Amino acid sequence: MQEESTQQKKPIRAAALKRTLRLYKYVKPYWPAFGLGLFFLFVSSAANLAFPKLLGELVDAAGGQRIISNPHRINQIGLWLAAVLIAQGIFGYLRIILFVNVTERSLASLRQHIYNHLIRLPMRFFLNRRVGELGSRISSDISLLQETFTTTIAEFIRQVIIIVGGIALLLHTSVQLTLMMLACLPVVMVIAYFFGKFVRRYSKLAQSQVAEANTIVEETLQGVLNVKAFANEFFEMKRYRRKILEVAATGMKTGKFRGAFAASMIIGVFGAMIAVIWRGALLIAEGQLDPGMLLSFVLYSSFIGGSVAGLAEVYTSIQKSIGATEHLLEILDEPAEPIEETTMVAAKDHLTGQISFDNVSFHYPTREDQAVLQNVSFDIAPDQQIALVGPSGAGKSTIVSLLLRLYDPQEGTIRFNGKDASTFPLSALRSQMAIVPQDVFLFGGTIRENIAYGKPGATTEEVTAAARQANAWEFIARFPDGLDTVVGERGIQLSGGQRQRIAIARAVLKNPRILILDEATSALDSESERLVQDALEKLMEGRTSIVIAHRLSTVRQADKIIVLDKGKLVEEGTHQELILMDGGLYRSLSEMQFSH
């Protein structure tokens, strides 16, 4: 049984390493610079190996038991050592510059690629993931890769060169001492493998915990108004404290393994060196070895010992980066929506405003056992004003999500212009729709930027005209900076009515064929509601409009009212038709609202 689980583990590790190497495609465009950096690395590592040999010769040139002192030779070796030192410094400097440049460009490309992919992912991906966690993937996980790309890989190559070159030179110096030293290597390798496993596991856990801690910070800062309104500052402090203590505990566990690993390596490496020096001293006493050769051998041994220890450290760093890579590749492996940049919509994809739902049934991917819509069918003619009404949870907002193709129905068909919605390019479809939501989201920039979001690149005249049509110009003009007024995080510096009118101006600028209004006036005072309602009426002219209504007073003039209850279409007609239906849901809702 144990054997079987071991066999299962190996391919997983190999697959993880293979997945990590996929990220090296971002280095490909900079391969010439990377290759030159590798060449400099090779030269500086080779120069490193010249030191023990030259220092040994320097000692022998000074004279010993069997050698006569040679001042000219001492000066010559001294100059060689100085030249090697300068060359190593120059090549080391050039190597670091090249590797850092390649790394920064590669990671900028990787960050851009991950962000581009993330923003193209379908809504189902975001249903069970939190913003802070995804932000952490782009920041801390990629920062971890930065260390790997800049130093870890270079260190790995350098250590391998020193180990291979050092062993070759050791064999040339003394086969007997070399075999004695190599006998210690398997012990060091086993220690590295054993501790590397635990370091990788805890490093991956720490990355996840850091992402969760970042999520708490991001969510509490975004919802700081709610935190303060509910006097929950200390609750959030405790929540964050619990999470960072978990991060610290995981870090301390990792530290224990790294500490035990370092201690084992020190004992192993220095124990081997003591044994080698002891044996070398005996060989000098027997006249089989020169003092300079023993010095070279000890220095090579310390280089190799240091490199083996460094290699193990590099191994643990690679394990950490594999953990970070797995998280990033999970995002990159998610299938993205087939969207494309749309500047002009092809004539065949122009919407007339006609929509039909034909026996549409739907449930959210995270709640497969809970049907949100069941066999819903209705038709909307071009330029009609349609109202969707019904109790909370009836499926009104879901219909909007399906129209925007944020999700596709499990059963039934949605048609535009009489054609299946799936035959239209996704970007072309969405570019001809606009939504004014109940809870308006504004970006933290200026009013101009928020309105122009409906049509990037719009001129000041177009933005101003849209603001006027949305009844927003009267308050924008009062601000000292006008259109360049900064609205603050999520538009916090504007009132609810002002945010709504900016959202309407954004929709005006987009000039959609199909307009969706999610009860855009429900949270406003009467004066703001009058201005917003007037702006909405102007916006709805000459286009198909779908209004999600909670207050029925706003939909009396609708061409058709669709009444939903528990995911089913229960009534359909005008206000006058529905109000006359005995025992009808619309009549019941209407009486409840207007009796107050």
Image: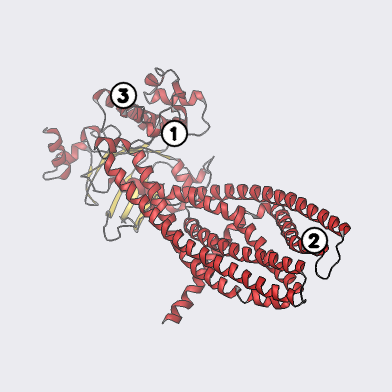
Is residue 130 visible in the rendered structure shown here? Answer: no
Up-down relation of residue 311 to residue 423 (above or below): below
Specify which label sits upstream in the sequence, 2 or 1. Answer: 2
Residue furthest right as drawn: 72
Q: Mark 3 points at which residue?
A: 531
Instruction: Look at label 1 and name its amino acid.
Output: Asn
Question: Between tags 2 and 1, which lies in front?
Answer: 2
Q: Name the residue under label 2.
A: 58
Q: Nearer the viewer, residue 554 or 327?
A: 327
Image-based side of 526 in relation to 88, left or right: left
Write the residue at 87% across / 61% down.
Answer: 70
Cα separation between marks 2 and 1: 84 Å
For the residue labelled by badge 2, is the local secondary structure a helix, a strand or a loop? helix
Specify which label sits upstream in the sequence, 1 or 3. Answer: 1
Q: Which of 533 and 311 is in front in this view?
A: 311
Q: Mark 1 points at which residue?
A: 511
* Image spot of residue 199 (x, y percent): 47, 63
